[in-house]
Image (cartoon, rainbow, N blue to C red):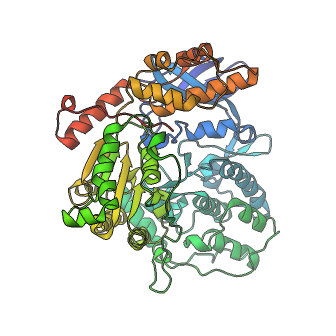
């Protein structure tokens, strides 16, 4: 059932038509008022894929709307929160652009000269440049003639928010089945979507405007599976880029096309600025890069020059340690007893044949301080430590990620005793039975090899995850990840401490009662409380008054919980399944502040 009904009035617009979308939790409508037509997008955060929402709970489209210049370039009229029967929703209203789709013109036989095509492509690159230059870059991911509108006023509009995302290295937050396979960069087929993948798509767009079809394009059966479509594209791209029809192109233009359409990530234009400079003739492409014979070939590693985890930063960390952590006493005791005691008492460890566990998985609802606790453990222990994100291990080369994983563990062994913390571990070791990707299976296998009894090499692994049910079961067996530790919502004492820590050192009135605030924020996570205090502090600063109980109480009334009751129940079920122990038999664990 759709969130809005036909004929309904919404923010001054009338809903005229509902349009199907490919992503769960996203709805699209055509709307209008007396002066203009518009497109309305509704987003239900509870139904959207988890990866579709940023770490701060912000949708990519909200990031776009927050930048005035970018919002104006994309014809955004309004963007805000909307409550639908208690649901946490967002909406975006975008002006309907009247004009002709590039795809329609190409289907009608329209062909562009270089001089005609470049001004259009430059406007497209300018729209994309604005996305890429946001403080948290956004990737369009669907630059095709269908999403390019030649407006009636002579400008060029780039539409298509359905696949907008943050940089991606792994499972994308949007459905890929409806993407045009010929406009996708090679690296997107292994889960890498970034600025350069948009650059490649612009190159395909330019080629299609010149020749009437995408490079390497062949017929794909309508009933082909995603795997078959991928294979068809990969096989077609084994042939050199065909420019035999380009007799009208100058040598410099041919070199530019070869560079922007390079299947080798490293040979392509690195960003929109460099592509724009080449299109404008400011920085001509003087050397012809090697053209890959196959999509996979450029990503292969060689024995003489291998992509390594050169950015590893395994070293001790300084800070307040566990003193900065509110509650979580049970978790602290586990880490003291099982890890710190053994590592810091080598003689006793040898005498009693004690070994540290290989690793621990900290899991639970988002915002409960799992990553924060791992960082504070590193400070408390004084051990060499590194926080590892999926992007740190990403590679554009076949088996490149496996090489980075091996290099990382080798470096950790050299600097033992050391701690490796893998943030959002489920993205790195997904269940192989639910993935058809050979590359992902190889990466999981490499993790399994490195995790095997890694404590004997002086390496302790911490994984954090909001979705432990998506982790490959082989990773969680003893001998690899030995401890499964559930981090729940903070209890009353922890919330009280969270408020104390968040307000510490701020300009506060004498009437602030952290206990009273803790009692009114049951069900909130650490990030909710931190955000509440930050928002109230800003409000107080603008009024040049101290942070008072009244301001904080008003803030509590309007704050949004990051974790719903249904999500808490889901995590409780996951906990029972993973640990095979009744939830009622476990002690509550405290909480972390950050």
The answer to whether 451 appears left or right of 190 in the picture is left
Camera-side residue of 289 and 165:
165
- Position of the N terminus, as image quadrant, is top left
The answer to whether 31 appears left or right of 566 in the picture is right
Q: Residue furthest bottom?
A: 304
Q: Residue at x 75, y 24 (%)?
A: 542
Residue 5 in sight from this viewpoint: no
Q: Quadrant of residue 251?
A: bottom right
The answer to whether 467 appears left or right of 516 in the picture is left
On the image, the x and y values in percent for residue 107 come to 60, 53
On the image, the x and y values in percent for residue 24 come to 42, 36
Camera-side residue of 461 and 63:
461
Residue 523 in sight from this viewpoint: yes
On the image, the x and y values in percent for residue 513 come to 53, 17
Camera-side residue of 51 and 546:
546
Q: Residue at x 79, y 71 (%)?
A: 283
Residue 222 lies, with reference to residue 554, above or below; the image says below
How many labels, in total?
A: 0
Q: Residue at x 37, y 46 (%)?
A: 465
Q: Residue at x 80, y 63 (%)?
A: 115
Residue 234 lies, with reference to residue 467, above or below; the image says below
On the image, the x and y values in percent for residue 322 come to 44, 44
Residue 6 lies, with reference to residue 409, above or below; the image says above
């Amino acid at each position: 059932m759709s969130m809005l009904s036909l004929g309904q009035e919404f923010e001054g617009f009338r809903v005229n038509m509902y349009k199907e979308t490919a992503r769960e939790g996203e709805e699209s409508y055509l709307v209008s008022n007396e002066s203009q037509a518009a497109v309305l997008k509704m987003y239900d955060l509870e139904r959207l894929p988890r990866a579709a929402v940023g770490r701060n709970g912000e949708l990519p489209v909200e990031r776009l709307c927050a930048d005035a210049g970018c919002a104006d370039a994309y014809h955004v009229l309004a963007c805000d929160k909307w409550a639908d029967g208690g649901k946490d929703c967002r909406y975006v209203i975008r002006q309907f652009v009247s004009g002709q789709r590039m795809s329609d013109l190409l289907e009608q036989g329209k062909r562009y000269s270089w001089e005609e095509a470049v001004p259009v492509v430059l406007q497209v690159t300018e729209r994309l440049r604005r996305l890429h230059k946001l403080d948290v870059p956004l990737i369009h991911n669907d630059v095709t003639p269908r999403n390019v509108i030649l407006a009636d006023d002579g400008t060029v509009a780039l539409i298509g928010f359905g696949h907008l995302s943050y940089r991606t290295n792994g499972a994308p937050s949007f459905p890929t089945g409806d993407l045009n396979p010929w406009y996708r960069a090679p690296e997107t087929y292994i889960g890498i979507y970034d600025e350069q993948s948009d650059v490649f798509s612009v190159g395909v767009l330019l080629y299609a405007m010149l020749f009437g079809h995408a490079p390497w394009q062949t017929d794909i059966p309508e009933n082909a599976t995603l795997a078959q479509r991928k294979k068809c594209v990969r096989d077609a791209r084994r042939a050199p880029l065909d420019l035999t029809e380009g007799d009208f192109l100058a040598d410099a233009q041919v070199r530019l096309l070869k560079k922007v359409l390079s299947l080798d990530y490293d040979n392509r234009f690195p960003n929109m600025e460099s592509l724009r400079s080449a299109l404008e003739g400011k920085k001509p492409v003087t050397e012809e890069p090697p053209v890959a014979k196959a999509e996979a070939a450029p990503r292969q590693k060689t024995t003489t020059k291998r992509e390594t985890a050169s950015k590893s930063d395994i070293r001790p960390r300084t800070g307040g340690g566990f003193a900065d952590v509110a509650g979580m006493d049970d978790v602290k005791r586990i880490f003291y007893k099982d890890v710190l005691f053994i590592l810091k008492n080598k003689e006793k460890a040898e005498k009693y044949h004690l070994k540290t566990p290989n690793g621990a998985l900290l899991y639970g609802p988002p915002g409960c301080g799992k990553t924060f606790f791992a960082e504070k453990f590193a400070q408390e222990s004084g051990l060499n430590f590194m926080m590892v994100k999926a992007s740190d291990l990403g590679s554009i080369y076949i088996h490149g990620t496996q090489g980075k994983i091996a290099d990382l563990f080798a470096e950790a062994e050299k600097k033992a005793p050391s701690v490796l913390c893998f943030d959002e571990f489920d993205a790195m070791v997904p269940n192989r039975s639910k993935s058809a990707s050979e590359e992902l299976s190889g990466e999981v296998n490499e993790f399994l090899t490195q995790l095997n009894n890694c404590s004997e090499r002086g390496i302790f692994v911490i994984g954090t995850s909001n979705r432990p049910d998506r982790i490959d079961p082989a990773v969680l067996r003893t001998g690899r990840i030995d401890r499964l530790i559930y981090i729940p919502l903070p209890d009353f004492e922890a919330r009280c401490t969270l408020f104390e820590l968040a307000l510490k050192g701020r300009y506060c009135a004498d009437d602030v009662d952290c206990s009273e605030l803790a009692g009114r924020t049951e069900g909130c996570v650490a990030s909710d409380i931190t955000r509440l205090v930050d928002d109230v502090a800003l409000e107080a600063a603008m009024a040049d008054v101290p942070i008072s109980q009244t301001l904080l109480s008003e803030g509590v009334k309007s704050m949004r919980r990051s974790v719903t009751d249904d999500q808490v129940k889901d995590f409780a079920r996951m906990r029972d399944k993973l640990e095979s122990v009744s939830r009622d038999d476990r002690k509550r664990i405290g909480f972390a502040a950050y």
